[in-house]
Image: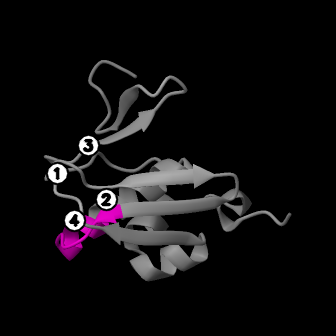
Amino acid sequence: MAKSAISQHIPSAEHVLNAPLEQLLAEFDIELDFYAIDDPTFTGIAVVKRDKVRYILPAGRPDAEREIVVRAMLGQTLHVDLPDLPEPYQLSEFDEDGQPHLVNPRPKGGA
């Protein structure tokens, strides 16, 4: 099996923050799907399986929100150190037990 674009290189923070979003999605072979989700606190989820990455976002949200959320998820997926997310956005990862852990904005006082 060929390596995915995700495992081939790590981009700079500048690239993740400034490249056109559609270019980033194509560059790293990330599928973006939209679903009707009624929870206003849900802004998206990243599903990473082997060499395939899929981001699922709520339909009908503003383009600016989509930009922020997708770039933050991409940074986390690729292990790129990005600035903290603006309020009220938060990015969490789930551990092997299914427990969420805040990763951005970075928890105060360490991990």
Q: Secondary structure at mark 1?
A: loop
Magenta region includes residue 62? yes
Residue under the image location 50 percent in, 74 percent down = 24
Task: Please state the extent of the stretch shown in magenta in the rendering.
Answer: 57-67
Looking at the image, which is closer to me, 70 or 107?
Answer: 70
Q: Secondary structure at mark 2?
A: helix
Can you identify the residue that label 3 sits on?
90
Measured as percent of width and height from the top left, residue 83 is found at 33, 49
> Is residue 111 shown above or below 15?
above
Of mark 1 and mark 4, the one earlier in the sequence is 1
Point out the residue furthest to the top here. Answer: 109
Tell me the distance, in whole angstroms, between the alpha carbons under discs 4 and 2.
6 Å
Can you identify the residue that label 4 sits on?
65
Tell me the distance, in whole angstroms, between the alpha carbons under discs 1 and 3.
15 Å
Q: Contact (CB < 8 A) between labels 4 and 2?
A: yes
Q: Which mark is residue 99?
A: none
Q: Contact (CB < 8 A) between labels 3 and 2?
A: no
- Position of the C terminus, as image quadrant, is top left
Measured as percent of width and height from the top left, residue 9 is found at 68, 61
Measured as percent of width and height from the top left, residue 61 is found at 18, 69
How many numbered discs sit on the rendered protein? Answer: 4
Tell me the distance, in whole angstroms, between the alpha carbons under discs 3 and 4.
12 Å
Can the viewer see residue 14?
A: yes
> Is residue 27 shown above or below 8?
below
Can you identify the residue that label 1 sits on?
39
Q: Which mark is residue 69?
A: 2
Q: Secondary structure at mark 4?
A: helix
Q: Is residue 41 left or right of residue 74?
A: left
Q: Is residue 48 left or right of residue 32?
A: right
Looking at the image, which is closer to me, 104 or 39?
Answer: 39
Can the viewer see residue 11?
A: no
